[in-house]
Image (spheres, rainbow, N blue to C red):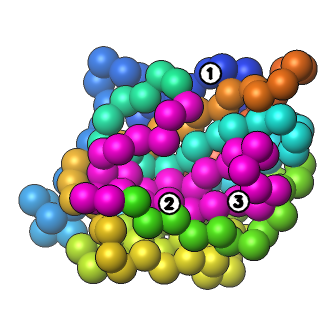
């Protein structure tokens, strides 16, 4: 497994050469992103994991096309699901933050974005569905003293 620590981010294949998913151009109907991750601390942390259109280097929630999971312990003690196209759509998944490994899955199509945690559908967004091109992004940042990090077991993506 890989660990990304406090105030770090991981972009697709690196900032200079991100792999953008452009499914409709290639005849595919959806993108599936699956990540098995664990927060190393469930207090004083912000994290963002998912598909984005623009590279971010801080924690500001993107105001560009995106579909991602969000952690912000200053706002909620649960994982949240967020999409953005022309405006924001956000859902509290009601899944409590903890330090266990979880499988996060995002299925993005032309008509909706489905969010799963541990194979349970936790949110469906059909209003603010992002348009291509999107790439994989993970960001972690500490809100308070101490080191915050995410352990990454695997990241899997496919167009189908």
Magenta residue span: 59-87
145 or 35, nearer to the observer: 145
Which residue lies under the disc numbered 1?
8
**Residue 9 in picture, x, y percent from top left:** 56, 26
Whichever of callouts 1 and 2 sits on the residue coming sooner in the sequence is: 1
Q: Local crowd at mark 3 within 10 Å, few (<14), some, or many (≥20)? A: many
Q: Position of residue 137 (x, y in %)?
A: 48, 39
Q: Give the image location of residue 105, x and y in percent.
A: 57, 65
Mark 3 secondary-structure assignment: strand
Going 37% across and 52% down the picture, which residue do you hit? 66
Comparing marks 3 and 1, which lies closer to the viewer? 3
Q: Position of residue 136 (x, y in %)?
A: 43, 43
Q: Is residue 16 left or right of residue 45?
A: left
Q: Is residue 44 above or below residue 159?
A: above
Quarter holding residue 122:
bottom right
Q: Is residue 50 visible?
A: yes
Secondary element type, mark 1:
strand
Q: Residue 82, which numbered label?
A: 2
Q: Which residue position is annotated with label 3?
A: 79
Depth check, front residue: 73 or 50: 73
| 146 up-or-down from 110: above or below | above
């Amino acid at each position: 497994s890989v660990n990304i620590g406090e105030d770090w981010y991981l972009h697709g294949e690196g900032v200079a050469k991100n792999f953008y998913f452009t499914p409709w151009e290639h005849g595919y109907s959806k993108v599936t992103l699956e990540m098995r991750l664990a927060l190393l601390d469930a207090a004083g942390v912000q994290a963002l994991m998912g598909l984005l259109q623009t590279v971010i280097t801080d924690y500001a929630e993107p105001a560009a096309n995106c579909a991602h999971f969000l952690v912000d312990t200053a706002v909620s003690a649960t994982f949240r699901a967020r999409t953005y196209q022309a405006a924001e759509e956000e859902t509290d998944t009601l899944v409590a933050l903890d330090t266990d490994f979880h499988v996060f899955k995002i299925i993005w199509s032309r008509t909706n974005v489905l969010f799963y945690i541990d194979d349970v559908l936790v949110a469906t967004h059909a209003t603010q569905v992002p348009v291509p091109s999107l790439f994989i992004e993970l960001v972690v940042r500490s809100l308070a003293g101490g080191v915050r990090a995410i352990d990454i077991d695997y990241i899997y993506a496919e167009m189908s």
